[in-house]
Amino acid sequence: METNTFKTIAKYGLGAMLISAGIGHLTFARKEFQAQVPEWVPLEKDDTVVYSGIVEIAMGTAIIAAPKKYESLVGRLAAGLFTAVFPGNIAQYKNRKDSFGLNTDNKRFARLFMQPLLLLWAIKATD
């Protein structure tokens, strides 16, 4: 498969994943996402989930719709988003919160290694 085709598929896949996750924040997975909000966040858990869902929908849309000259910037912003939500994954592991089928310490620990892959995906799909 040609590199440009692969990058295009990766870019649209990432955008679609972010939009789907954002919709999940606002609808069917709201409680699951609340389990990942660290206690130190100064907002209500549900407010945090709603706001982050809106950001994910906007970010996914931007990844898909950004003009070519802004793709790299949008990719770096997406990488920043994945970095910003990482403390939630750490909190889920540390506080042993079950959600999204992550119901063991090993599964929650393994999830921590997915975030760097998402970050890399965002950068490589848009560079």
Image: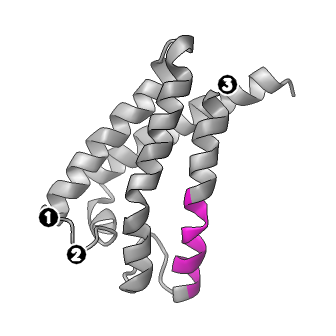
User: Badge 2: how crowded within 10 Å, few (<14), some, or many (20+)?
Assistant: few
To which residue does mark 1 refer? Answer: 42
Task: Say which amino acid is labelled 2.
Answer: Glu
Q: Which mark is residue 39?
A: 2
Residue 95: x and y, percent?
A: 36, 85
**How far apart, in angstroms, are the residues tagged by discs 2 and 1?**
8 Å
**How far apart, in angstroms, are the residues tagged by discs 2 and 3?**
38 Å
Image quadrant in which the C terminus is located: top right
- In this rendering, position of residue 99 left or right of residue 126: left
**What's the residue at 49%, 77% (across, down)?**
102
Residue 38: x and y, percent?
A: 28, 71
Residue 27 in view, yes or no: no
Determine contact: label 2, label 1, CB under 8 Å.
no
Magenta-tinted stretch: 106-115
> Which quarter of the figure has residue 90?
bottom left
Q: Is the magenta stretch mostly helix, strand or loop?
A: helix
Q: Nearer the viewer, mark 2 or mark 3?
A: 2
Whether the magenta-drawn stretch holds residue 114 is answered as yes
State whether residue 31 is above or below residue 110.
above
Q: Is mark 1 on a helix, strand or loop?
A: loop
Whether the magenta-drawn stretch holds residue 102 is answered as no
User: Badge 3: how crowded within 10 Å, few (<14), some, or many (20+)?
Assistant: some
Most extreme residue toward the right is: 1
**How far apart, in angstroms, are the residues tagged by discs 1 and 3?**
38 Å
35, 23: nearer the viewer: 35
**What's the residue at 27%, 40% (across, down)?**
54
Q: Nearer the viewer, mark 1 or mark 3?
A: 1
Residue 91 in view, yes or no: yes
- In this rendering, position of residue 96 left or right of residue 47: right
Q: Residue 8 carries which label?
A: 3
Task: Say which amino acid is labelled 1.
Answer: Pro
